[in-house]
Amino acid sequence: MATDWEYQTAKQQLQAIQKGEVSSRDLLEHCIARVERLNPALNAVVATDYVAARQRADEADAARNRGESLGPLHGLPMTIKDTWEVPGMPCTAGAGIFRDYRPKKPAVAVNALESAGAIVFGKTNVPVFASDLQSFNKIYGTTRNPWDVKRTPGGSSGGAAAALAAGFTALELGSDIGGSIRIPAHFCGVYGHKPTHGIVSLRGHIPGPPGTMGEGDLVVGGPLARSAEDLQLAMDVIAGDVPLVQPGWNLKLPAAKQKKLQDFRVLLWVDDAACPLDTNLVAQYGKLERALRESGVSVDKSNPLGMDLDQLYPTYLNLLGSVMGVSRKKFERRLMGLAAPLLHRLGQHLDAPRHFDQFLAGAGQSHADWLRFDERRNRLREKFKRVFEQYDVILMPPALTTAIPHNQERELPLRKIEINGARRNYADLLMWISPATLMGLPATSAPVGITDSGLPCNIQIVGAPYQDKTTIKFASLLAKVIGGFTPPSL
């Protein structure tokens, strides 16, 4: 095929299908051929259902020939993170216990995508129970970064980000509780959006266990793509259909008020003593700041309200521990709770991850204690609204460094990474994503260039609650100033 379809955006592919420049079946076959050629080296796509996908593609083409539309994603081939239930393919969440689990109906968000005309042809790799910032497990093995196969694409939506960067798919559905959309997008140089908490249904997502009715604390589902416009395209499809609040709730996200980049009031928060950045990132964010100022954008550079990560991160870790502790046995939760005060006293001597005692405390705490931390979270969220009276978006790093080398030898709390020649705790990768997750804020991870080390680099665009369209709009306008997605050399 003459066109390089693999790096067309979803919107471009959809327009080509609509105009008859390419059939859905031909586009699907192009995706399949690319996966079969390049995936063995990357291991991003771990399960497929080509038979059903081909049938749906043929149906989409027949409908188009009749002048019928299946929806805004009519005939678009795509992959889905292997935490979402898709009939016809396993849904393992990287865990051996679910190796043979085959869902009978799609997750709510997957159903929305397919009802809009999307054709899901594959599933992408994740860590065990989607609980790591690298994507590897005993079922499918290790996923490698298309920019450097010696490095991770991130996690838990690592296979999703790698598949996008490699040109296997133009659209992905991920999920995020510990930066699982934002950090893989950053490591692979693609776009990702963590929605405002609660606006995209998690029903049909693992974890929790299959059949879970609740929507879950902190965690969200959201899209990854190669353009900001595609993020909005997907959000328009998956947001709002939340079964727990139907039929009495209707989502109407406000449109962005800003028409051009110069209309935005920007706070740049890229310096925090609790989590200093790799010098490669510092240099890239310096270029970003200059590009914004030269474009006439109003930029202030400071911490919001004089707050720092040490005032937000402990509460996030406590609530994260509560979520993660649900899957633990009662005696394990009790032991974690008992270990928390000991680690608090000895953590500095043990070189433990910063505030990790709060994670342990959260896993073992009572419901009464959880309610206290939930109230603390709500007070912080209310206080933080004052930031958005002065600024439209906050620009923050998704992580303290670019894609790290594969690091699977020890348990997560014991791992170390090297930043600026010094050893840092692996768990520090969570610090910069914690404010948006803690307060349920929308956050768009957008490419801002390639560092001097030759790896992609993103910025995290954080907005006020329910201002998802504003952060995505900023990402779209930013691409015109500093560039968007850049394909890796494969």
Image (cartoon, helix red, strand yellow):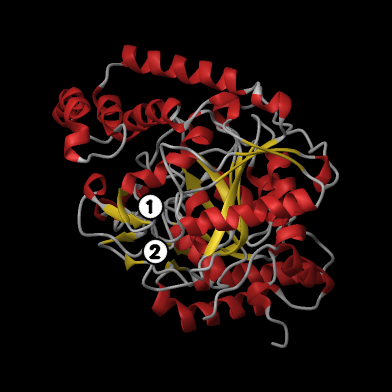
- On residue 133, the disc is 1
Residue 17, image x and y in percent?
A: 76, 71
Q: Residues within 10 Å of mark 2 (few under 14, many from 20)?
A: many
Q: Position of residue 132 (x, y in %)?
A: 34, 50
Q: Nearer the viewer, residue 285 or 54?
A: 285
Drawn side of residue 410 relative to residue 324, left or right: left
Q: Is residue 376 left or right of residue 199?
A: left
- Name the residue located 46 percent from the left edge and 36 percent from the top edge: 434
Residue 152: image x %, image y %? 39, 63
Compared to residue 8, the image places residue 283 above or below, namely above
| Amino acid type of the residue that numbered disc 1 sits on in the rendered structure | Leu
User: What's the residue type where badge 2 is placed?
Assistant: Thr
Tell me if I can see residue 177 in this picture. no
Label 1: few (<14), some or many (≥20) within 10 Å?
A: many
Q: In this figure, which residue is indicated by the disc labeled 2?
A: 152
Q: Residue 374 versus residue 458: which sits nearer the camera? A: 458
**Marks 1 and 2 close (CB-CB < 8 Å):** yes
